[in-house]
């Protein structure tokens, strides 16, 4: 067996050295049948360039998907400010929460779709599915008689964008060697996460609602939210086209459902999923709720000017978290990051009680940074945990086979934990909605503070779980550089 990949004819931009190693497809177009990123010679000669190309277009597709997933985070605030549908604050929070829940559920089948259909093939499908929520949004907002239940169903279809993350991360995890997974997964995830900031920044400008710190005002024709639906529908088609022409499928990523689902029996699957609720669940939950919280708690502040900042700093921090975890260890970084997240939450509670906008914004942005760092460090932990576990179970047996099994299990856990984490985002937004329901549709400051006290308690459990299982001297994996 050679150390060169076997795949269908690549793009004309592929290096000549790689072009000469290409053979005809064995399963169809753009399948790579041999992939060994841990082999340094293979990686330097061929693997790095192919992996980078797939990462670039994976990031673009995931960015568009994340934007669509959180479309309603900013659309709901604009509906309150510029449309007269008559929905309560509690109803608007549930309108934001529903895509999070659906996206969390869809991440499970999306995880298993890559080993079944191939990463490139599924990226095409997931890009085209984004036409459903975007086109439906454009139609709904142009009809003043659209009922709340219809908006709720349309918002639910935005969950298609949330499912994309699981398949994208599962796919990219196979392309990169273990030594580079933290940074690669961090970049891939950050590229998607920053889609939240882009839609919260770009949507108000596109629809004429102003934003960008007052540098752009509302258009003379008024706010046209339907315009955003058509723009992101076109971007979904573009993402699918880029995946079709420039991405590849890896044969080594293929696995049966039975091989992957065995990870639900491992306790570490659920431990890292719990931690990911604390990091990613907080990121997507706070990103979704932030515009509405500003609009409702500080009505004198133009939400469109600041709504995107939280998602932006959280997204930018994610690859830094993966990079730093590669160097000092994911478990150590994750533990101290949860401590910082808890401290930031305390300051948010103080700011809400005191109704101080500058303190609220600063503390919330600090919490967003910790969600990004924690996202990167937690995902770096997963490959390390499952490969170490596979090696321990193999004993003196076949080390290569154990490592291969560990990579397959880690890829499945990355997808499953992302689903659980996304459900945490639904819980966060729904908590604000439930507290609004018990307050006659309003969300007063004391109810918001109560919600953050609940979240604070959860972060404490995350820090304790990290220390007990991966940092405590004497724990099974404490010396494994997790």
Image: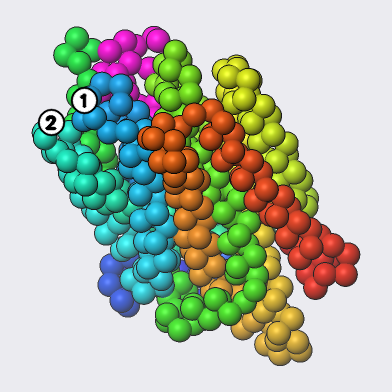
**Whole-percent x and y of residue 333?**
74, 49
> Which is more N-terminal, label 1 or label 2?
1
Q: Residue at x 83, y 66 (%)?
A: 479
The residue indicated by pointer 1 is 84
Question: On residue 403, which mark appears?
Answer: none
Q: Is residue 43 above or below residue 342?
A: below
**Whole-percent x and y of residue 169?**
48, 57
Tell me the magenta residue range. Answer: 198-218
Q: Residue at x 88, y 70 (%)?
A: 474
Q: Is residue 240 above or below residue 251?
A: above
Q: Is residue 373 visible?
A: no
The residues bearing labels 2 and 1 have C-alpha atoms spaced at a distance of 8 Å
- Looking at the image, residue 160 sits to the left or right of residue 301; the answer is left
Snapshot quadrant of residue 168: bottom left
Asked if the stretch drawn in magenta spans residue 300, the answer is no
Snapshot quadrant of residue 181: bottom right
- Looking at the image, residue 390 sits to the left or right of residue 130; the answer is right
Q: Secondary structure at mark 2?
A: loop
Q: Are marks 2 and 1 in contact (CB under 8 Å)?
A: yes
The residue indicated by pointer 2 is 144
**Whole-percent x and y of residue 357?**
57, 18
**Whole-percent x and y of residue 173?**
53, 61
Q: Is residue 163 above or below residue 216?
A: below
- Image quadrant for the C terminus? bottom right
Q: Nearer the viewer, residue 302 or 12?
A: 302
């Amino acid at each position: 067996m050679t150390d060169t990949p076997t795949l269908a004819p690549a793009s004309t931009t592929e290096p000549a050295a790689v072009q000469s190693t290409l053979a005809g497809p064995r399963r169809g177009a753009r399948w790579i049948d041999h992939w060994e990123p841990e082999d340094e010679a293979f990686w330097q000669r061929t693997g790095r360039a192919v992996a980078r190309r797939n990462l670039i277009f994976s990031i673009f597709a995931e960015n568009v998907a994340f934007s669509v997933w959180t479309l309603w985070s900013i659309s709901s605030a604009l509906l309150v400010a510029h449309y007269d549908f008559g929905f309560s604050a509690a109803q608007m929070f549930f309108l934001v929460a529903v895509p999070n829940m659906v996206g969390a559920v869809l991440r499970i089948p999306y995880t298993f779709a890559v080993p079944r259909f191939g990463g490139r093939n599924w990226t095409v499908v997931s890009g085209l599915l984004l036409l459903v929520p975007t086109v439906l949004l454009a139609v709904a907002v142009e009809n003043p008689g659209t009922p709340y239940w219809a908006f709720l169903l349309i918002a639910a279809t935005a969950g298609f964008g949330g499912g994309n993350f699981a398949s994208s991360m599962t796919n990219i995890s196979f392309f990169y060697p273990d030594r580079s997974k933290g940074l690669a997964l961090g970049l891939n995830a950050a590229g998607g996460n920053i889609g939240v900031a882009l839609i919260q920044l770009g949507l108000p400008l596109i629809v004429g609602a102003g934003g960008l710190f007052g540098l752009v005002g509302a258009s003379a024709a008024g706010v046209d939210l339907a315009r955003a639906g058509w723009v992101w529908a076109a971007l979904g088609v573009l993402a699918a086209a880029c995946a079709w022409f420039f991405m590849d499928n890896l044969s080594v990523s293929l696995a049966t459902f039975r091989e992957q689902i065995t990870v639900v029996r491992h306790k570490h699957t659920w431990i890292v999923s719990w931690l990911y609720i604390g990091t990613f669940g907080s990121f997507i939950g706070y990103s979704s709720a932030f515009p509405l919280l500003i609009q409702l708690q500080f009505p004198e502040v133009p939400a469109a000017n600041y709504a995107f900042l939280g998602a932006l700093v959280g997204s930018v921090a994610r690859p830094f978290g993966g990079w730093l975890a590669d160097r000092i260890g994911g478990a150590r970084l994750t533990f101290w990051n949860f401590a910082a997240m808890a401290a930031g939450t305390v300051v948010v509670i103080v700011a809400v009680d005191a109704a101080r906008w500058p303190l609220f914004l600063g503390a919330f942005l600090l919490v967003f940074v910790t969600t990004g760092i924690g996202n990167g460090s937690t995902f770096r932990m997963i490959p390390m945990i499952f490969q170490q576990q596979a090696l321990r179970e193999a004993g003196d047996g076949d080390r290569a086979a154990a490592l291969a099994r560990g990579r397959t299990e880690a890829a499945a856990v990355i997808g499953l934990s992302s689903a659980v984490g996304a459900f945490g985002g639904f819980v966060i937004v729904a908590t604000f909605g439930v507290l609004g329901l018990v307050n006659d549709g309003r969300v007063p400051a004391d109810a918001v503070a109560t919600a953050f006290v609940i979240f604070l308690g959860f972060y404490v459990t995350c820090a304790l779980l990290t220390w007990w299982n991966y940092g405590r001297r004497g724990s099974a994996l404490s010396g494994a550089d997790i």
